[in-house]
Image: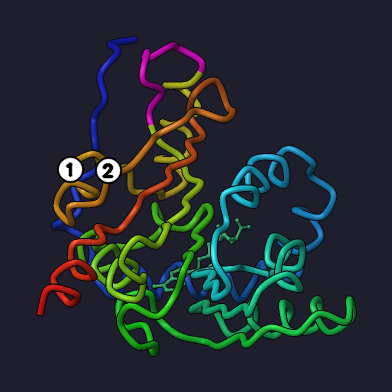
Amino acid sequence: MKKQKNYSNESALSDEFTEKNNILYSKIAKGYDILIKVLPIWNNWNSHAIPHIEGKRVLEVSFGTGLLLSKYASNYETFGIDYNPKMVEIAKKNIRDKGISAQLLQGNVESLPYNSNSFDTVLNTMAFTGYPDSLKAMSELNRVLKPGGKLIMVDINFPKNMNILGMLLTKFWILLGDVIRDMEKVFNHFDLDYTDKEIGGFGSVHLYIATKSSKEVITQQID
Ligand SMILES: C[S@@+](CC[C@H](N)C(=O)[O-])C[C@H]1O[C@@H](n2cnc3c(N)ncnc32)[C@H](O)[C@@H]1O
């Protein structure tokens, strides 16, 4: 097999891509909820995000059925948004059953209904590779973060050392429809400082921690 990081071509994607996935998520939402509850590996990967949460106000974008959210939400003022109404419904029930409160909404990452500079931490797990337009999505994730705030992402990408198993796993996700980007370019576009740690799947599961520049705060103070 030729080892090459062939990033996906986004330009062919559109709102139809989101709608197609949305129809699929509506069909599989119940099964998805059960599967991730019994699949410890998925849980383990996503749970890497929790120790990095900072501050009081936390937003999780694309929370799915809310499994990760239910693990940290009671410690923060927690907000969440997901595009799929069925996922939102199940997540609301899941957190209600656990006696946890969080403000969950249905909505699109490309137009988040929150004020700019309003969250200390934004979480996003196993979802970015399912958005059609990386710059639109990252622009919104970045906008709602406070200066100095943290964006914590868990997602699929090629392993840095391009080992065969990790490359095969990433290609498997691409076959399933995931859109793999050069995340360095995406973070740099928004001047986000970031770290990229491989946390599983032979290097194909990455934990990104990006920090929004606090330049805006300094400028405001000088003004
Ligand atoms: C693979 S699931 C991941 C769910 C959860 N974060 C997890 O790790 O189990 C992807 C989620 O992204 C949501 N999603 C897809 N497109 C979205 C969009 N444009 N805006 C917000 N959420 C979206 C889907 O509804 C789905 O719940």
Left or right of 179? Residue 172 is right
Residue in view at x 75 percent, y 53 percent = 36
Residue at the outermost front position: 222
Q: Residue 91 appears at what percent x and percent y?
A: 71, 77
- Residue 146: percent from left, percent from top: 35, 71
SS for tag 2? loop
Amino acid type for the residue under numbered disc 2: Arg
**Which residue is at the front of the view, 146 or 36?**
146
Q: Which residue is mark 2?
A: 181
Residue at x 49% of width, y 70% of height:
61
Q: Nearer the viewer, residue 167 or 59?
A: 59
Q: Is residue 98 left or right of residue 123?
A: right
Residue plotted at (71% across, 40% down): 44
Q: Are marks 1 and 2 in contact (CB under 8 Å)?
A: yes
Closer-to-camera residue (16/84) = 84
For the record, the magenta segment spans 158-165
Rate crowding at label 1 as few (under 14), some (14 to 19) or many (20 or more) other CA atoms within 10 Å.
Answer: few
Q: Which mark is residue 185?
A: 1
Query: Residue at image x 81%, y 60%?
Result: 34
Give SS at disc 1: helix
- Hey, which quadrant is residue 150 in on the image? bottom left
Magenta part, dominant SS: loop
Q: How is the image coloured?
A: rainbow
User: Is 80 contained in the magenta span?
Assistant: no
